[in-house]
Image (cartoon, grey):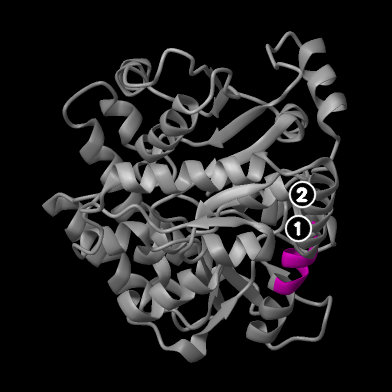
Amino acid sequence: MPRFAGMLASAYQALGHEVQRWSPQPVLQPWFAGTRLGKWAGYVDQYLLFPRWVRRQLREAHPDTLYVFADQALGPWVPLVQHLPHVIHVHDLLALRSAQGLVPENPTRWSGRVYQRYIRRGFRHGRRFICISRRTQTDLIAFGGVDAALTDVVYNDLNHPFRALGLEAAVSALQARGLPMPATGCLVHISGGQWYKNLPGVLGLYAEYASRHAQPLPLWLIGPFGPADLARSLKPLPSQARVHCVSGLDAVTLEQVYGAAQALLFPSHAEGFGWPILEAQAAGCPVLTTDDAPMNEIGGPEARYLPRLKANADKQAWCRQGADQLDDLLRADEAERQRRSAACVQWASGFAQGRALQAYLAIYREVIGQAPGVGHEH
């Protein structure tokens, strides 16, 4: 969320708007760092000192100021400006749904449930919400208790101008960087290791696919993974399976990986938006993902879909179904691959950079009730 807030600030400053970023600062916490009181000092900074500082700033703020909350988790501070023009960006309600016991894959401790109630009580004072998907909007209304009339949906933009490089060019570029990409390409999965990314399902699907082939494509796992947990997860794979783990890739290198990939495996339990789906398609890479919102919102007509892997499902049957879908994708002839790649790129072009920022700005102007180009966004 700090990256998202920074992106908003930079974009609107570039358009000539005056922008300030307000966030809790460590005042007491550094004095108690490394002690048992450090966490509690941080809470004092956030929930006692920061609101006092905000109230002082509000007394001096320009009357045309719009207050933008970059994340719904900032709900505890919404009541401070409930009487002033403001908007709240809502990315996902996964934590809130989990806290209400609606996600068996992610049980929440009592402290997390209390904190989510605190957040929800705060953002219920909000006047306007911008959701990144229709699924997020639906969850906000159903589980957040927000009036539907106060919500808008603005899909995220692509955060990099991904291009379809073609297999040969992408493989050459990666090999020139010293990365071991074979000429036949790979399969790819993007993850931060979160529960909802369904890494066990990805590895189970890949194990089933690899067991059917003497020389299966390698699976590239992109993202931070705990070595111990990953080692345990890889043990059941057949001997011919090959998994390559890499993290810290910049956008250019990631574009090359997508270009070399024969498919993105992304059967998430849940997402707020699903960036990798869109990134892969913009790079011409086919996607196998979950037939549930928002994945099927973002994937569109060219993605392949699997049912959500539920906690009580027959995992082996699900893996076989996924491997069937993957084999079908990989059997396509060159003409079909080219058609599919072009269709993916065309779909992703609807999420071009700059579109969401302009949509946000239109909502901001509506909320603040000012003529275009006049106001101040803080």
What's the amino acid at mark 2? Answer: Ala
Label 2 CA crowd tier, 10 Å (few <14, some 14–19, many 20+): many
Label 1 CA crowd tier, 10 Å (few <14, some 14–19, many 20+): many
Q: Which mark is residue 348?
A: 1
Q: Position of residue 75 (x, y in %)?
A: 38, 66
Can you tell which quarter of the image residue 152 is in? bottom right
Q: Which mark is residue 282?
A: 2
- Residue ID at (44%, 25%): 211
149 vs 57: above or below = below
Task: Decide which of tag 2 and tag 1 comes sooner along the chain.
Answer: 2
Q: Secondary structure at mark 2?
A: helix
Magenta region: 353-359
| Quarter placement of the C terminus | bottom right
- Residue ID at (74%, 29%): 260
Q: Between residue 192 and residue 65, name the one nearer to us.
A: 192
367 vs 305: above or below = below
What's the amino acid at mark 1? Answer: Ala
Q: Between residue 238 and residue 364, name the one nearer to us.
A: 238
Horizontal relation, residue 313 to residue 337: left or right: left
Q: How many discs appear?
A: 2
Q: Between residue 298 and residue 186, name the one nearer to us.
A: 186
Horizontal relation, residue 158 to residue 198: left or right: right
